[in-house]
Amino acid sequence: MMNSTELNQSLGTSEVLWNLEDLYKSVEDDAIGGDEAWCRQEAQDINKDYYGRVTDLRPTDLLKLVVRLEALDCRLLKLATFSFLNFATQLDNGQAGGLDQRIRELNSQCGTKTIFFELEWNRIEEEHVAVFLEDPALEKYRHYLSALRRYRSHQLSEAEEKILLEKQITGRSSWTTLFTKVLANHKFGARQRTEEEVLTDLYNSDRTVRKNSADELTEGLRANLHILTHVFNTLAADKMVEDRLRNYPGWVSSMNLHNELEDKTVDTLVNAVTSRYDIVSRYYNLKKELLGLDRLKDYDRYAPLPSLSKKQVSWDQSKTIVLDSFSAFSSEMSKIAEQFFDRNWIHAPVMQNKRGGAFAHPCVPEVHPYVMVNFTGNLRDVSTVAHELGHGIHQVLAGGQGHFNSDTPLPLAETASVFAELLVFTRQLEQLQAKEEKKAFICQKLESIFATVFRQTAMNRFEDLMHRGRREQGELTAEQLTQFWLTTQRDMFRESVELRDDYGIWWAYIPHFLSTPGYVYSYAFGELLVLSLYSIYQKEGDSFIDKYLTLLSSGGSRSPYELLQPFGIDLNSCQFWLSGLDVIDQLLKQVE
């Protein structure tokens, strides 16, 4: 079996490394120190010029203040993007880690100087705010300013807000960095492999390889369980305290507010998905028969069907598949995606001490996003590349709105990535001729959809039990967290998959629970929304494309409800979400 270096060479990813010089030349670049100094001074100057005066500003003066705040935030984001990306591929590098921490501290320091704006803006009476928002001078920032008001009832005093900002540098981000370092530095199994390599083997056609891989992951998690349990408890407690201080009614309320979604919308989504867990159990009972197994175990969930192509896909082949799929839908999408490949905006090889998983990281509008994947050459990885490039395309298009307006709510951000995946799947399916191979390919897509819709919703249910448990029962043991995980996973699989006790600790490697609590429902939101949008595309044809690109280009300039109005979508309708689930049901019936 190849090691990661040999794998990278065989796939052609060894040199697929991002060029961070579009941000800074290196960690030694004098421009970093210069930008840090500018940010400190500008934050101080903004405080000096405007502190205590926001209520009395004229619209044109408020515009000047917002423009300065946006420029400061841009410069801070540029620094933070460089430090994070530089560290993400070398988690054992002390200099890289030190820079990343230094920039986090700078963000916190500048935040204490500028927090006054949000506090003073939200203390203004509604009548006065309406005058500001109706003024043509502030038209560009109207949604940004009105959206800030949604936090009005959850803000603390200035002194309290400053203390929370100061404490951020030793708070959530530091604990998530510890979590990332623990798993990135751990060498799994006798072959001392990375987490990414072990997870990849869960998709192996050999059942012994899958079981060994699952056992190696369990063994590695168990070896670090005392640390991971402590990290989970600490961050659940941290969230509990902040939610209490800010008077949020529930653990997920702050995420819903961040996403500009009503609690009702999210509850409707979750209830609709859990009501169709029968789709999951039907599929895995069918898969058991297709694999010829008496019992499907947790390490069999991702086993490929015998007729699925086992051919490795090289990096260049993956590039061709993705770009051709995008081009068939929109030449503009394809041209933007091509820049990621040609201009070194992607980091693809599997490496020790590189962060696991994949992401697209937005930057400031005048630079560009970056994409990270851990490419191992299977069909899933092609989908992952498409997924992250979907994010990247969205971020490039939304950049035209400017920094503050380009930040898209998470559920709509997932829409762009999932739509990109669906374009690639549809294109690849059209090119298959053999019936059994087509069936196997649809099954793989179903499993991808399940991971996005059902598994993420089940993980949302785990989070619900974890946060409620921490608030009602106090410090949680690893055994309690394991029980929460098994309960919510078994609700989804029912009797179709046997989940061993070892599988019970697999909650411990999911980073989203720590970095962005409540985030995971965004995946289900995005997938079901995409299934609906794709149905509209099939009916409308080319006229849909401009509407879709307009949606992406709008970024976060309006609320999700407003952005989706041109498509006639009601996010509070249970029937809307069930119609997306019906599309999944129909796909399954094709296989059945």
Image (cartoon, rainbow, N blue to C red):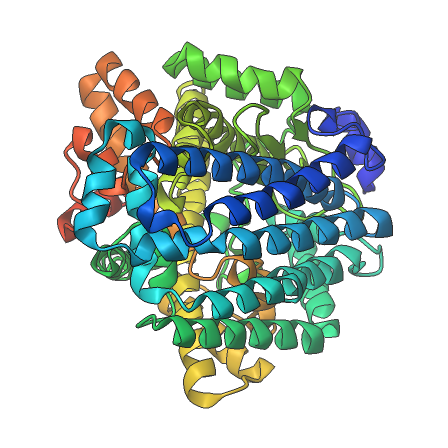
Is any part of residue 113 visible from this angle?
yes
Query: 39 or 287, which is in the foreground?
Result: 39
Question: Picture coordinates of residue 322 (x, y %)?
Answer: 52, 21
Which quadrant of the figure has residue 269? bottom left
| Quarter in which the C terminus is drawn | top left
Answer with the quarter of the image where residue 340 lies: top right
Quadrant in the picture for residue 232? bottom right
Number of marks in picture: 0
Residue pictured at 52% horizontal, 33% vertical: 383
Q: Position of residue 413 (x, y in %)?
A: 41, 39
Between 84 and 191, which is closer to the camera in this rendering?
A: 84
Q: Relative to residue 140, is residue 332 drawn left or right?
A: right
| Image coords of residue 247 (percent x, y) | 34, 73
113 shown above or below 2: below
Residue 140 to residue 333: above or below? below
Whether residue 297 appears in this view of the structure is no
The one of 214 and 290 positioned closer to us in this rendering: 214
Residue at point 75%, 73% (across, down): 223
In the rendered view, does 212 fall on the left or right side of 139? Answer: right
